[in-house]
Image: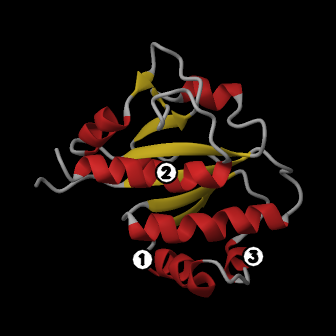
Amino acid sequence: MKKLKRLTLILYNSYDKTRWHEAHKRAIARAAPICYAFDCNLAIMDFPCKMEDILNIKTTIGNSGEYLEKLIEKNRFFIVDKFLPQFGIPIASTSKPDEKKAITPLDTAYLLKKKPIGVYVGLGRHGLPKDIMESCVYHLDVTEKRVSLETCTAIGSIPAVIYCYTKYI
C-alpha cells in the first residue's frame, strides 16, 4: 500500500472565543486519542488558550492525557488562528454539504494518497461558520446520509471511517 499523506483534524471553536471553557478542554482530550490511534494530526483553531493551558489540562480521558502529550512530543498538535498550508486541502465536515463541494469518505481516502488534508469539525451547536464553509474545497458528510452527529461522535467517526477506507484502496 502506498504511504498516505497526513490527515489533520481541526477543531474549530464556535463556542466562546474569549474564555477557556471546560468544553474546550474536553473536546481536545477526546480528540487526542482518536488522532493518535488513527495517525492524524490535531489542530485547534480560534481557541482562547496557549500551549501552557494545553499542558495543564487534567483529565481521565485518553489515559490521563497521555495521547495528547504524545501528539505534542511528535509535533502533531497545533494551536492556530488560520488554516496552515501544511494541512493540505481544507475539508469541512457537515451533514449539509454543498452538492458542488461534496466528497465521500472513500474519495477522501483516495485524496489522502496524493495530498494531506485538513478536516474541520465545528464545536458547538452552530457548527462551522459560513466563511470556513466557503473556504473549504470539499464538504464531507461522513455518514453519507445527511445525519447530523454530535461533536464528539463526529470527532471519532471522521478519522475512523476514513482510516478504514484507506485499508482497502
Residue 70 visible in the picture: yes
Q: Which of the two discs, 3 and 2, labels the residue nearer the N terminus? A: 3
Q: How far apart are marks 1 and 3 (CA)?
A: 18 Å
Secondary structure under tag 1 reads: loop
Q: Measuring from the top left, give residue 76's x and y in whole percent.
A: 45, 68
* Residue 168: numbered disc: none
Label 2 sits on what residue type? Ser
Residue under label 3? 53
- Tag nearer the camera, 3 or 2: 2
Q: In this view, does 12 lie to the left or right of 99?
A: right
- Is 54 drawn above or below residue 168 in the view shown? below
Residue 76 visible in the picture: no
Q: How crowded is mark 3: few (under 14 residues within 10 Å), some or many (20 or more)?
A: few
Q: Residues within 10 Å of mark 1 (few under 14, many from 20)?
A: few
Label 3 sits on what residue type? Asp
Q: Which of the two discs, 2 and 1, labels the residue nearer the N terminus? A: 1
Secondary structure under tag 3 reads: helix
Q: Residues within 10 Å of mark 2 (few under 14, many from 20)?
A: some
The N terminus appears in which quarter of the rendering? bottom left
Residue situated in front as seen by the camera: 105 or 131? 105
Q: Measuring from the top left, give residue 120's x and y in whole percent.
A: 56, 43
Residue situated in front as seen by the camera: 5 or 23? 23
